[in-house]
Amino acid sequence: MSRLRSWFLAPAGLWIAFFVAAPLGVVAAYSLLTRGTYGGLSEPWTLENYLRLADPLYLKILARSFWIAGLTTLLCLILGFPLALFLARSGERKHLYLALVILPFWTSYLVRTYAWMFLLRDTGLVNTLLIEAGWLERPLALLYNDGAVILGLVHGHLPYMVLPLFATLERLDRSLVEAAGDLGAPPRETFFRVVVPLARPGIAAGSLLVFIPCLGAFLTPDLLGGGKTVMIGNLIQNQFTAARDWPFGAAASLALMVLVMLMLGLLLRRGGERFL
Amino acid sequence: MSRLLGVYAAAVYAFLHLPLIILGVFSFNASRFTVWEGFSLRWYRAALENPQLLEACWNSLLVAAAATLLATALGTLCAYGLWKRRSAPIEAGLYVSLVTPEVVMGISLLAFYQWLFRYFDVRLGMHTVVLAHVTFCLAYVVLVVLARLRTLEPALEEAAMDLGATEWQAFRRVTLPLAGPGIAAAALLCFALSFDDYVITSLVAGVDSETLPMVIYAMARRGVSPVVNAVSTAIVFGLGVFILLAERLRRA
Amino acid sequence: MRRREFVVALPGLACRSGRPRLNVFNWSDYVAPETVPAFEAEFGVRVRYGTYESGEEMLAKVLSGNSGWDVVFPSNSLVEPMREQGLLAPLRHAWLPNLDNLEEGFRRPPWDPKLDWCVPYMWGGTGIACRREVTPPAGWASLWEERWRGRLTMLDDPAEVLGACLKKLGWSVNSTDPVELRRAGEEARAQKPLLRAYVNAEVRDQLVAGDVLAAQLWATTALQAMEETAELAFVWPAEGFPLYADNAVILRESGRVELAHRFIDYLLRPDVAVAVVKATKTATVNAKAKALLPERLRLNPVLYPPAEVLRRGEWFTALPAAAQRLRDRIWTEIRAA
C-alpha cells in the first residue's frame, strides 16, 4: 500500500543483501571446497564436508548444545519474567531500573566471565568465605563444570530476555489485570491466564534471543567449563582456528543454521507466533 | 504480590551486579591477587598510563556509538515497515542473521571483505568493524522495536490520517513517540552488543581498530589483571553517571 | 590512532603522518616496553604495534593478503604453510647485517634452512609446572597418577595434549600414523577424569595461588609464574617434549619492505634482545644477547635447558591434511568424552 513502507524497508533490505546474504554465499561456496594441504581452500568441489557431519560424535555434541542452550533459556525466563514485570510496573523510575539491568553489560563479556572465575575458583571469594565461616573444610569444585557454564550463560544473556519482555509487558493493559482481579481471579490465576498469554510475543522474542547465541557459544564453555565440554560453537570455532579446516567449519555452520531455521519455521507455523 | 515482586527483582539485580561489584571492589586492591591488601589507586594509574588501553577504549566507544546510531535507525525503519506489512525476503534475512553463530558471521564477513578488496583499495579498519557491528545488531533492533510496535493499535495511525495527517506525519507524530521505549531499549541493547563483541571484531578488525574487548582478552588471558578491573569499573561508573544525568535531564 | 584524525579522515584510508609507518603484528607480551618506542625514535618512523593471542587468529587475518600488517611472527610450523600460500616476501640478507648474531642452530633451522623467508625470534618448549609441596612428576607418564585428581591441568591445544600422550607412548609429537594417534587419544581420554581443565596461560594465577598442583605448561609461562612465587618448580619431561620457535616474517603485501627489514634487524641487536628477554622471560635465539644475559637467566634451566635435556626436545612441524583432520576428530572425541 504505502510508499513510505517501501522506503523504510529499502535500507535494511539492501544492508541484509550486502552484509548477510552475500557473505553467507561466500561461506556456502567454501563449504563445497576441499581443505588444502596446509589449511587453505582448494578444489575439487565436493559434498564430502556435509557427509562428514553425519557422525554420531557430532550428533552427540549437537544434542548436548541444545540441552544446555534450552536450560539456559528456561532459567533466563524464570529469572527475567518477574524482573520485567517489576520494571513494567515501576512507573516513573522504570528507565532508571532498565538502565540498571543493562549497566553490567557495558563491561566486556570477557571481564564478567573472568569475574565469575575469580568468584568460583578454589581460592576464589565464595570458597574462601565459606571456609572462613567454618561451613566448609575443603573448597567446593565450583568452576570448570556444566553448572559454571550455565551460570555464565544465564548471566550473560539475561538482558536479552528482559528487554523484549519489558517491551511487551510495559504496554500490557493494566485494566485487564485489574478486571481479572475484580472478577475474583486470584493473583496466580490472573498471572497465568491473563499476563502470560498477553506477554507471549515478548516471551517468544526473548527466548529466541537467548537460545540462539547460547547454541553457538564457545567462549563460556572454554573459560568456565575448562574446555572439558564441547558445544557446537566450539566445534565450529575450532575448524576455523586450530584445525584450519574452513570447508568443514563452513559446512557445519550452515547445517546448524539450517537446523535452527527449520525449528524456527516449525515454531512459527505451529504456535502462530511471530517474532518479526 | 507486588512486594514479593520487588524482593525477587532485588535478588535478580544482585545476581546481575555481583561480578561487577566484585570487580569494582578489587580494582582498588593494592595486591594483584585475591587477597585484600588495602586500598590503592595504583591500577587506575596503570590503566591511565597504558596508551594501548586508552586508544582501544576510545575505539570501542566510537564503534559502539556509530553502530548503535546506524543500526537503530535502519532497524526502526525496518520494524515499522514490517509492522505495516510483512516482507518474506527481509524477514528471512533477519532470521538468518539471528541464527548465524558469531564465528560464522565473522568469518563470512572477513571472506566477503577479502573479495571486495580485490576491486576496491580498502583495508580492514574501523569502517569494517562498524559495518560488521551494524550487521549483527540490526536483527536485534528490529526484534525489540517490532515487539513494541505489535502492542500498538494500528488504528491510531489510521485515525491520524483520517484527520488529515500525511503518512509521514502519522509515523512521526503518532507511532514513533509510542514506539519510543522500544527504540530506546533497542539502542541500549545495540550499544551493549557492540561494545562487548570480541569474536566478530577480532576477525574483521584491521591495523588501526583494536577495540577494548580485544585488549582485555589479551590482558586477561594471562591471568586476572587488576588493570582490567580498573578499566571496567571506570567505564561502568562513567556510563552509569551519564545515564543518570540523561534521565534527570529528560525528566526536567 | 589520534581521535581528531579519525573524525576528519576516514580511518585506515588516509596516510596521515609524514613519517613513514610500519605495522607490526606480534604475540602479546613479546617485546620489552621500550623496544618499539626506541625504534621509532632512532629511525624517525611510527610503528603500529598490534598483538594477537593465537597463530590462527593472525593467519585468518593475513590470509586476505590485504590485512595492512607488514611484519608478523608465525611459529615454526606455520612458516611453511604461509610460504606455500604465497603470503611471505623473500628476505634480503644484505639488509639484515645482525643475522650473524643468531645462535648456530637457528641459522639453519629445519623449517627454513637458508632463512630465505623468516628470521627466528624466540623459542621455548612445553613441560610440566608443579607446586613444590608435591613430589615432582618425572615425566608425562606421572600425569596419569591418581594423586593429581582435580588439581591437574593440560593445555587447551590439540597439538600439545596429543603431543604429550604420544611422547608418553614413546612416539613423535608430529606423528601422522592413525594407529599411534588413536592410541594417544585413548590415553588422553583415560587422563581426562583426573583433570581440572584444559586451559592455557590462564592457569598461571591458579598455580601461584595453589588451586592447581601440576600443569602442562610452556616454559616461558611457567617462568613468569615462578617469578611470582618460590613455591613452583618446572620439569622437562623424561620422555621428551615439543619445542617451538616464533619467527619474524615480512608479508608479501607489505609496501615497506626495507623498513620491515630494518625493524627485524633491530630486533636482532644484542642489547634489544636482552631487554626483550628480561621483560618476557622467553629464550632468545640470539647468541650475542644470550652471552649478555645476567647469570640468573642465562643459567636458568627453565629458560635454557642444558644440552642433554634439550636433546629430548622435538620441533613441531606442519602436518599433512589427512593427519590434521584425524587429529581434530580425536581432539573433539577427547573433549566430548
Image (cartoon, grey):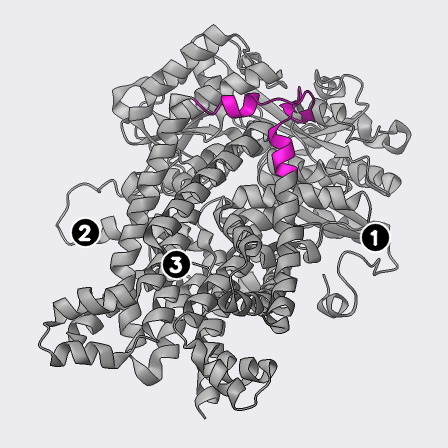
Q: Quadrant of the C terminus of chain C?
A: top left
Q: Is residue C286 above or below residue A200?
A: above
Query: Is-magenta flag for residue A27?
Result: yes
| Residue appearing at x 27%, y 53% in the figure | A75
State whether discs 3 and 1 lie on one chain.
Answer: no
Q: Mark 2 sits on what residue?
A: A130
Q: Are marks 3 and 2 in contact (CB under 8 Å)?
A: no
Q: Amino acid at mark 3?
A: Ala
Q: Which mark is residue C45?
A: 1
Q: Are marks 1 and 2 in contact (CB under 8 Å)?
A: no
Q: Which mark is residue A116?
A: none
| Residue appearing at x 52%, y 48% in the figure | B96
Query: Is-magenta flag for residue A107?
Result: no
Q: Is residue C298 above or below residue A99?
A: above
| Badge 3 density bin: few <14, some 14–19, many ≥20, Cα 10 Å | many
Task: Give the chain letter at badge 1.
Answer: C
Query: How far apart in space, not on screen, are marks 3 and 2 (Cα)?
Result: 39 Å
Q: Which residues are magenta?
A: A26-54
- Residue farthest toward the bottom in the current orientation of the protein: B252
Q: Which mark is residue A205?
A: 3
Query: How far apart in space, not on screen, are marks 1 and 2 (Cα)?
Result: 56 Å
Q: Quadrant of the N terminus of chain C?
A: bottom right
Residue C294 position, x and y percent, is 62, 35
Which mark's residue is nearer the viewer, 3 or 2?
3
Residue B204 position, x and y percent, is 65, 48
Q: Of residues B29 and A90, which is closer to you in this image?
A: A90
State whether discs 3 and 2 lie on one chain.
Answer: yes
For mark 1, give the secondary structure.
loop
